[in-house]
Amino acid sequence: MKHLLIALRVTLVFTLITGAAYPLIVTGLAKGLFRHQADGSLIQAGGHTVGSEWIGQNFTKPGYFHGRPSAAGNDGYDGLSSGGSNLGPTNQKLADRTAADIRKFRAENPTFTGSVPPDAVTASGSGLDPHISPETAEAQVARVAGARGMSQEAVRQLVAANTAGRQFGFLGEARVNVLQLNLALDQAAPGRR
């Protein structure tokens, strides 16, 4: 009986430490030191929350930059079904989907004649990547500028202003947050979308 009481006390103590105290301390520190990130890195516009810096959205209008394809959920961009398609490089479904995405990208951006950037037609591992490469943004500049009635140079300046470099100068690649870029477009040309 003595051993059972000791085991119960130890279980109770560790439950309180790991199940209550530790999460409260970590959450408190996160809220105190990194409030924006701890609250989901939410982006506000016009007094409303319009998204998160870290969750991609499906933009389809010609006056907006389009993000990467999404394999999250049945229709894509489903935060509850985050994940890739799990289709391998030799899978015919993946080849067909990529070919269809290339045709769609070319149809949406008819003046673009270069090679289609890979991230324009491939989903990320999470299916919710909020970023595109600067090359993918450049491929869409003419379409967005035309739809917005803006000069291509003005749109390029917005792309440049919303391009983040490599993290710490050497990790990853340069990237453009699609939501932030599209919000900047809305501010620059509010009546045209």
Image (tube, helix red, strand yellow):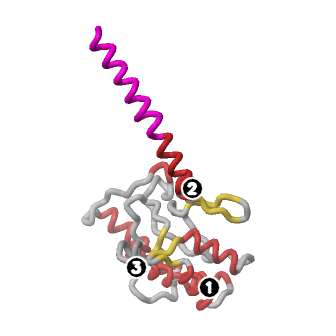
What is the magenta segment's predominant secondary structure?
Answer: helix
Q: Which of pointers 1 and 3 lies earlier in the amino acid sequence? A: 3
Disc 2 residue type?
Answer: Arg
Q: Viewed as shown, does residue 38 lie left or right of 17?
A: right
Contact? badges 2 and 1 (CB < 8 Å):
no
User: Disc 1 marks which residue?
Assistant: 145
Q: Is mark 2 on a helix, strand or loop?
A: helix
| Quadrant in the picture for residue 14 | top left
User: Disc 2 marks which residue?
Assistant: 35
Q: Is mark 1 on a helix, strand or loop?
A: helix
Q: Distance between the residues labelled 3 and 2?
A: 35 Å
User: Disc 3 marks which residue?
Assistant: 117
The structure residue drawn at horizontal position 50% and vertical position 70%, both measured from the top left corner, is: 67
Q: Marks 2 and 1: which is nearer the front?
A: 2
> Residue 112 placed where, x, y %?
48, 87
The structure residue drawn at horizontal position 64% and vertical position 75%, both measured from the top left corner, is: 184
Residue extent of the magenta highlight: 1-23
Is 178 one of the magenta-colored residues?
A: no
Disc 3 residue type?
Answer: Pro
Q: Is mark 3 on a helix, strand or loop?
A: loop
Q: In which quarter of the image is the C terminus?
A: bottom right
